[in-house]
Image (tube, grey):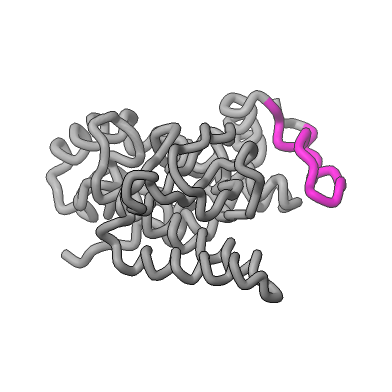
Amino acid sequence: MDRVDRLTTLMERFSLSVTSAPLGEATLVVYALSNGGAKRMQFRTSGKALRAPVGEIVFAARFDWGGGDNPLVAALPDVVDFDLSEDSECRGLIEVMESELAGKRCGAGSVVSRLGEVMVVRMLRAQIESGTTHASLLAGLSDPRLSRAIVAMHDAPGRTWRNDELARVAGLSLSRFSELFLTKVGETPAAYLRRWRLILARQDVAKGDRVETISRRYGYRSPEGFARAFKKHFGDNPVSLRGSDGVAMSNISKSG
């Protein structure tokens, strides 16, 4: 079976940003070890500032990729640290970073931030490939069979996925798929799909999409049923959220 793209949909749904910041506020740093100059990158997923690593700081920034709403960020360790010394391409990116920072040319800050985003994506790939022993989305994506089913749900959240369909996508028997998914991800496929739909629905509500439209988009039988599921998961009715322009969401008078 061909490998599936385990990051693109997550990248599209959660905006990745790496923005230069003072070291005391940084959640991502690229640094050189003081004992020989080997380069490393470290970032913190909780949003709290990192403790300054021992060594020469090449670049310090604020890292954000959707915070706790992003299920992959929630599955990552609090602090992720990578050795870049064996990655020649990342070393090349760091050299460009250093050149931009030293030259202080027009747009250097934006160039360095974009390079930081590229490095984060490369490190996320490595984290997925290395996996984890803890039940989580990260463990599921690191499994080449389960990842196919998870990506299918990510790409088509409004589809009425049955376990037997997802098992076929994964290339597993229904019983083995259900057992492995629960063990690796820590919840059933139906529970994960339900949570993924609600995460996306919350984004759409915040953008100002109509509740009726969102409920149809993610496979709910009625706006009222969607509103009840939304309140149970998030503690608030979708109508209580506001769009970025401050306009109230479409009202739903019978949301139970």
Q: Is residue 88 magenta?
A: no
Magenta span contains residue 244: yes
Magenta stretch, overall SS = loop
Q: Residue placed at 52% from the left, 46% from the top? A: 28
Relative to 237, residue 80 above or below: below
Quarter of the image with the C terminus is top right
Measuring from the top left, give residue 156's x and y in whole percent: 43, 57
Residue at the (66%, 45%) spot, across then down: 22
Q: Is residue 43 visible?
A: yes
Residue 118 lies, in percent from the top left, at 46, 63
Using the image as rendered, state which of residue 153 and residue 44 is in the foreground.
44
Left or right of 9 on screen, residue 61: right
Q: Position of residue 229 (x, y in %)?
A: 58, 31
Residue 129 vertical placement versus 223 (above, below): below
Pick out the residue farthest to the front: 35
- Left or right of 227 in this view: 70: left
Question: Relative to residue 89, is residue 219 drawn left or right?
Answer: right
**In-front residue for pair 250/13:** 13
Between residue 15 and residue 214, name the one nearer to us. Answer: 15
* Quadrant hosting residue 8: bottom left
**Whether residue 152 can be seen here:** no
> Residue 31 in the image: x percent, y percent?
45, 49
- The image quarter containing residue 78 is top left
In this picture, residue 145 sits left or right of residue 150 = left
The part of the chain drawn in magenta is: 236-253
Question: Which residue is painted at 63% across and 54% down in the image?
Answer: 19
Q: Quadrant of the N terminus?
A: bottom left
Q: Residue at x 51, y 59 (%)?
A: 116
